[in-house]
Amino acid sequence: MLDVAKRFVDVPPTERDTPDPFRYADLDLMLPLLKDAGFQNIETKEWRGKLPVGGGVNAETAANFAANDFAANESLRAAGETVFNEAKAAMAEELRKYEVDGVVMMNAYVHLVSGSAN
């Protein structure tokens, strides 16, 4: 969705450790925080599969979720209602490619992390 938003507005790059939904995709950021918090015996596993975007909704609702909650939100809002709505429509168009039986399902890559606290 970020690529779609960039067709409408300039989106400032985010710093590596900026809070966002993908902040801990890099285990090098997450694991030291867990260790510093006292966790031990930390194990990670990778999972790849399909997940529903926005909690199992159609393309239009998922686009609304993406436009309102992802990194480009502030830039899209600042550009005005017309640009925001055009970007959201373009997001819905892109998400329709992944809609199955009325639910947007996209490939996901997830780290499953376990450990014990002191």
Image (cartoon, rainbow, N blue to C red):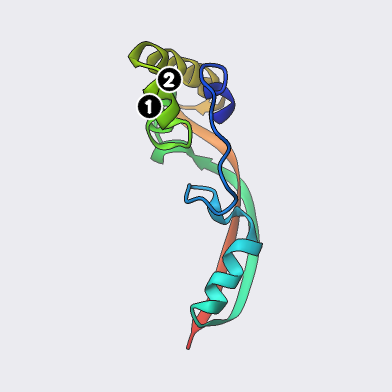
Residue 70, image x, y percentages? 45, 36
- Give amino acid for label 1: Asn
Q: Residues within 10 Å of mark 2 (few under 14, many from 20)?
A: many
Res. 13 visible in picture: yes
Question: Left or right: 74 with respect to 3?
Answer: left
Question: Left or right: 65 with respect to 35?
Answer: left
Res. 62 visible in picture: no
Label 1 to label 2, Cα distance in Å?
6 Å
Callouts 1 and 2 close, C-beta under 8 Å: yes
Q: Is residue 25 above or below residue 67?
A: below
Residue 27: give its label: none
Residue 64: give its label: 1
Which residue lies at the image location 48% right of the left edge and 47% below the top edge?
20
Q: Which residue is mark 2?
A: 88
Q: Is residue 111 above or below residue 18?
A: below
Q: Is residue 87 above or below residue 112?
A: above
- Give amino acid for label 2: Lys
